[in-house]
Image (spheres, rainbow, N blue to C red):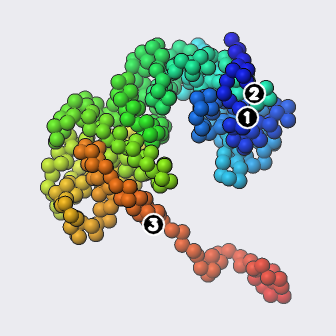
Amino acid sequence: MENIIEPSEHPIRPDMIDDEALYVMRKLNRAGFSSYLVGGGVRDLYLGKTPKDFDISTDARPGQIRRLFNNSRTIGRRFRLVQVFFKNRKTIEVSTLRSLSEHDIDGPEAILAPNNTYGTPDEDALRRDLTINALFYEIENRTIIDYVGGVDDLDRGIVRILGSPERRITHDPVRMMRAVRHSVRNNFIIEEQSWAAICKNHHLLRLCPPSRLRDETLKDIYSSAAAEWFELSLDGNLFTELFPIYQGHMTAVLHDGGSCREHLAKIFSTIDRLNKQAVASGNHRQPDYFLLAFLLIPWADLKFNLFEQKLKGPQLYQLAKRIREEINGTIGPDFNLRRSSRQEITTLLAHLPLLLQNQTQKSWPKWLKRKSYFKKCRLLYLFYREAVEGIEVEDEIHQASDETIERHKPRQQKRSKKSRRKGRPAFSGGKQGGVFGFKR
């Protein structure tokens, strides 16, 4: 049933919306189409947060949207979206309202069933993942349109999967990850039936494409709420589906007497602090492979007795080889990691024992400081010490690492005029008096 929330009954105002999003919505309205701010943008504005993205839905078809906006392109396979580009590198995504497909209503139990049917606002709301993500904001009347009780759930702090939780999870298991994500980010409670369906169907995550699971997991690792995400995901058995290398090892005792779960909880808390610090200071956050290597230290300790190793030369090479083989058989394919990422993780983990056995109170050996892996490996070592021993990494060290990342970015070499002309016609410069490089 449609519930219209009048401007006096909600906190959202047009001046809280990005100018680019307002421009797109108003242009669609002037062309005779309806337009709505949808999804997470409405949710975040209602909660007093700044949305990361402003997504728009309309009854205009993709081709009609493209004709309205020259600065746009069409993307998507399962359903076509239009991206509208602006000079400040901002992108506004515009989608055509969709309906529930026959698969969502009473069709086969298919994972990610096709859904290409255009629909109405109420039909579009019913096909979304959570009630709090199914709200529409309409700028002409400045009203929120709620078909699913999303505003009530926002007021009560509840995350609820729309429709039948089990059926909706079967069609797209990643909905379980989204429910957990919004619960920890907003300090909401997952509704009872939704939580029961998550706990029952956690194994379905294995049916999703590895690259999609990787991208969704990294969103949560970088969210600055990773510690809470870890605990709730572990309680619902999602974490061990995403990281099967930890299956059955959460209570295992590590080198210092702490459990694997305790170490991971401390690592996630450290990651949250470092991400918040990087964002606040405007520095680069650590790359994906670095944080994944950080999360794999307890696994490497269990698997290879990492903290008791005192190796060098051929022995160190053999350790790196064994670690790489394990990564290639586990987290590598589980997350569809690139070869370069697998090698970076291997290098960090394999050389960590060297730093442990050569640590001194004053400095590091000069031969170790000259190694190409030293700076990144030292940073990993210091972060792990912060997690386990509570010795906080100095901000200067973190910033120095960011500067190193910038300095080692591959530079694009300027080609000489000679190489630039090779195999192509030599056009004349800006001076008058010549055509195709030939003087008159």
**What's under tag 2, amino acid-wise?**
Arg
**What's under tag 1, amino acid-wise?**
Pro
Name the foreground residue: 25 vs 103: 25
Q: Which residue is mark 2?
A: 142
Q: Quadrant of the N terminus?
A: top right
- Residue at (62%, 39%) from the top-left corner? 53
Name the foreground residue: 123 vs 112: 123
Counting residues from the start of the chain, the first of labels 1 and 2 encountered is 1
- Answer left or right for 230 relative to 436: left
Name the foreground residue: 82 vs 1: 1
Pointers 3 and 1 in contact (CB under 8 A)?
no
Q: Which residue is mark 3?
A: 407
On the image, the x and y values in percent for residue 76 come to 63, 38
**Cα distance in 3D space between marks 2 and 3:** 48 Å
On the image, the x and y values in percent for residue 284 come to 47, 54
Q: Residue furthest front?
A: 8
Q: In what element is the residue under mark 1?
A: helix
Pointers 1 and 2 in contact (CB under 8 A)?
yes
**Which class describes the residues within 10 Å of circle 2: few (<14), some (14-19), or many (20+)?**
some
